[in-house]
Image (spheres, rainbow, N blue to C red):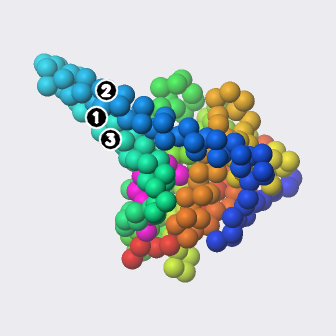
């Protein structure tokens, strides 16, 4: 039983192959236009939700309409990142973010989507192995996306249910987060290229960009990420980000 491992040390860039680089460049050219179109649509959806919130006499419906507007704002932040990226002076705006709070709130959102799509329940445990508040210096929206991508991958690897565990600890000046699942794991032949763009086993549904985004965002924040997988019994992703205290 072997454990396949892929580590990207701090500061190193795992370069995508030339073909992937060209595809990424092409994707980048389309991204700004797509972001613009989506931002307009979000404005329309937000207006409809606002009308529903104001006009509905059902408090439940108003509550859901408020929820829709909240998620629209989150989606706007993600689109905003594309605009900032298009600007050559782009640099992520770091805040002090409590990673435990981020993890638990992302878990609730992703779990809700997972259960709504009819998949089996997954047990989630999160442990905090340090006395200090787990603050990291990161852009909140990017951090949420990393965690959502990792949890999403784990849930998809456990269609019949399983266990997802997260452990937060301190390592020198970094906060370390380990996310482990008991899913089907990753075949050894895929491990070396797992962080490269467009590597996916989800032929139609997945873009193969989730782990690439995780790697790029973490490296941009001066952190590191490592993935190890034991085919047939589970996968563990460990990432570190500079502590924000
Ligand atoms: N926790 C995991 N367990 C099993 N396989 C995984 C896990 N995480 C990633 N993988 C494998 O790595 C591939 C690449 O993951 P990645 O998140 O980059 O892309 P994706 O999930 O296929 O698509 P996207 O995230 O863009 O929707 C997945 O298709 C899957 O085969
Ligand atoms: Mg994914």
Q: Is residue 138 magenta?
A: yes
Question: For disc 3, does the CB lie below 8 Å from ligand 1?
Answer: no
Label 2 – label 3 distance at C-alpha? 11 Å
Q: Earlier in the sequence, mark 1 or mark 2?
A: 2
Image coordinates for residue 118, horizontal then vertical, percent: 54, 23
Residue receiving disc 2: 45
Residue at 13% from the left image edge and 20% from the top image edge? 55
Label 1 – label 2 distance at C-alpha? 8 Å
Q: Is disc 3 surrounded by few (<14), some (14 to 19) or many (20+) residues within 10 Å? A: some
Q: Earlier in the sequence, mark 2 or mark 3?
A: 2
Q: Which mark is residue 19?
A: none
Which quadrant is the C terminus positioned in? bottom left
**In this orientation, does residue 64 appear?**
no
Residue receiving disc 1: 69
**Helix, strand or loop for disc 1:** helix
**Helix, strand or loop for disc 2:** helix
**In this orientation, does residue 114 appear?**
yes
Label 1 – label 3 distance at C-alpha? 6 Å
The residue nearer to you, when weighing 7 against 132, is 7
Contact between marks 2 and 3 (CB within 8 A): the answer is no
The residue nearer to you, when weighing 17 against 138, is 17
Give the extent of the magenta segment. 137-147
Contact between marks 1 and 3 (CB within 8 A): the answer is yes
Q: Is residue 22 magenta?
A: no
Image coordinates for residue 110, horizontal then vertical, percent: 48, 39
Residue receiving disc 3: 73
Residue at 73% from the left image edge and 43% from the top image edge? 199
Question: For disc 2, does the CB lie below 8 Å from ligand 1?
Answer: no
């Amino acid at each position: 039983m072997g454990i396949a491992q892929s580590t990207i040390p701090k500061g190193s860039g795992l370069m995508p192959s030339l073909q992937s680089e060209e595809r990424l460049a092409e994707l980048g050219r389309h991204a700004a236009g797509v972001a613009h179109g989506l931002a307009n649509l979000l404005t329309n959806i937000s207006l409809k939700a606002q009308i529903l919130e104001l006009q509905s006499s059902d408090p439940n419906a108003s509550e859901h309409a408020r929820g829709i507007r909240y998620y629209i704002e989150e989606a706007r932040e993600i689109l905003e990142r594309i605009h900032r990226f298009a600007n050559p002076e782009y640099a992520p705006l770091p805040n002090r973010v409590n990673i435990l709070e981020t993890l638990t709130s992302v878990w609730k959102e992703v779990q809700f989507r997972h259960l709504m799509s009819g998949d089996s329940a997954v047990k989630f445990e999160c442990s905090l192995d340090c006395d200090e508040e787990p603050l990291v210096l990161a852009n909140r929206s990017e951090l949420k996306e990393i965690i959502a991508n990792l949890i999403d991958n784990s849930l998809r690897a456990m269609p019949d249910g399983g266990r997802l565990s997260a452990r937060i600890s301190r390592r020198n000046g970094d906060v370390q987060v380990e996310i482990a699942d008991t899913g089907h794991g990753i075949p050894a032949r895929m491990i070396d290229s797992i962080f490269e763009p467009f590597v996916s086993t989800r032929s139609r549904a997945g873009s193969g960009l989730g782990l690439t985004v995780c790697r790029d965002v973490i490296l941009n924040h001066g952190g590191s990420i490592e993935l190890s997988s034991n085919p047939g019994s589970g996968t563990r992703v460990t990432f570190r980000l500079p502590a924000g205290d």
